[in-house]
Image (cartoon, helix red, strand yellow):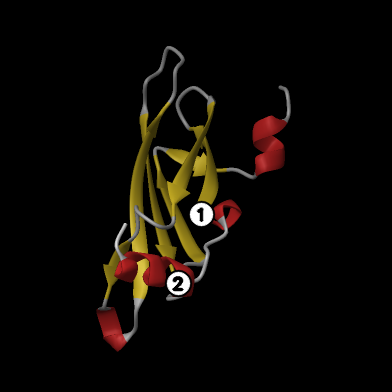
Amino acid sequence: MNLLEKISRFLSPRRNTAQRYIPIYVKCKRCGEKISGRVDLWNELSPDYEDGTMSYHCRKVLMGSGICFQKIEVVLRFDANRRLVDQEVAGGEAIEQEEFEADE
């Protein structure tokens, strides 16, 4: 590691790894299987420059492990600070963590 890399690491802010991922939970419309996934805020977001404002979006396709294998598409939109502002789900419905963890 050269001197410039050491100085850069020293001066750059440390990122909290707990804030790196956002969990997402969906339920399949066809079979009712609950599926979870996560979004890596450091690597998976794509920038949007619409209307002169900075924002991000991410598209995930989730598929369960049961007998259905229905693909569920999740489109997430984030503000300039990478906070979730909108979520659209096709092929399923968004659910909360408590519902995902609850036994049926």
Is label 2 or label 1 in front? 2
The residue at the far top in this view is: 67
The residue at the far front in this view is: 3
Locate residue 27, reporting x and y percent: 53, 34
Q: Is residue 27 above or below residue 17?
A: above
Tell me the quarter of the image containing the N terminus: bottom left
- Mark 2, Cα crowd under 10 Å, few <14 / some 14-19 / many 20+, is few
The answer to whether 78 appears left or right of 26 in the picture is left
Residue located 53% across and 51% down the image: 22
The image's mark for residue 12 is 2
Tell me the quarter of the image containing the C terminus: top right
Q: Which mark sits nearer the N-terminus, 2 or 1?
A: 2
CA–CA distance in space, label 2 to label 1: 17 Å
Q: Nearer the viewer, residue 82 or 32?
A: 82
Locate residue 34, reporting x and y percent: 56, 29
Residue located 29% across and 62% down the image: 2
Number of callouts = 2
- Mark 1, Cα crowd under 10 Å, few <14 / some 14-19 / many 20+, is few
Residue located 33% across and 65% down the image: 5
> For the residue labelled by badge 2, is the local secondary structure a helix, a strand or a loop?
loop
The answer to whether 72 appears left or right of 38 in the picture is left
Q: Amino acid at mark 2?
A: Ser
The image's mark for residue 20 is 1
